[in-house]
Amino acid sequence: MTDLIAASAAPITRAAEARRPARRPGRRLAPGKRLPASRLIGPALVVALWAIASATGSLDPGFIPAPWTVLRTGVHLWTDGTLRTDVLTSLQRAALGFALGLTGGVVLALLSGLSRTGEALIDGTVQLNRAVPTLGLIPLFILWLGIGETFKVAIIAIVVYIPIYLNLHSALSGIDNRFVELAEVLRLSRPQFIRRIVIPGALPGFFVGLRLGVTGSWLSLVVLEQINATSGLGYLMFQAQNYGQTDVIILGLAIYGVFGLVSDTAVRLIERRVLSWRRTLSN
């Protein structure tokens, strides 16, 4: 699609540049140059304020332990193997559920977005599923699938596929019809139309859904691992609640937060590379 856009817009662009008045110096309205590691500044500031409040005694250690106490607890749990096992278990659950949800969301969105028949059969059902609280399905899924790993992975997959489907379907439906007409004039085949028009046009929406899906997988995992689980970060936090171990609970929340930030950053980096042809405020 980028080739078609460039080819069709080149004469208009040259004519507009010829009529454009000389650029006057003035205040720039764009956000400006991106700061290095800008997304780490906010979390680092929160940790710094937390440490200062703990060091000055403004925070009750029994209410919110100091950062170094949480770090020391994490090192101890990692050394004895408890934290290592729970982290790996949580990663496996989240990865499997995310993979299933991603596949289902993309397939359903393509079938619904590229076919009126598919839209009639799929879109209404997905919208109905979206209106039903996913975590409210837990009791039903336990009756269907048991209390093992299967129901946890299934719930994560449902939480993931919904935002991916919604954003990808919206992106497919929002492709400018003029590009479709241009493809018909150029007599593009169906595969060429999908490769040069559909995929580039739908990628921005797909990445938005992908980021929401990644976040959703971690959010649902926190709840699921506290239901009939024997391992995982959520189970570790649930056990810590029973024994009043606030430092372990905060450690689990911090690990979930780090996982979410890292996975979201990874998706952003992939998005920036894949969509490098776009010129937006973010880049």
Image: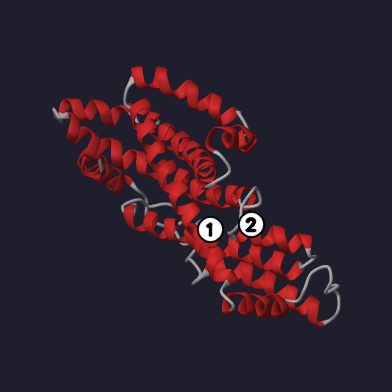
- Mark 1 lies on residue: 90
- Work out whether 64 lies above or below 124: below
Q: Earlier in the sequence, mark 1 or mark 2?
A: 1
Question: In front here: 157 or 182?
Answer: 157
Q: Amino acid at mark 2?
A: Gly
Question: In front here: 186 or 133?
Answer: 133
- Work out whether 14 lies above or below 185: below
| Left or right for 197, reference 76 | left
Disc number at residue 234? Answer: 2
Disc number at residue 268? Answer: none
Decide: few, some or many residues near mark 1? Use Cα within 10 Å; few <14, some 14-19, many ≥20: many
Quadrant for the C terminus in the image: bottom left
Label 2 element class? helix
Label 1 element class? helix
The answer to which quarter of the image holds residue 190 is: top left
| Left or right for 112, reference 246 | left
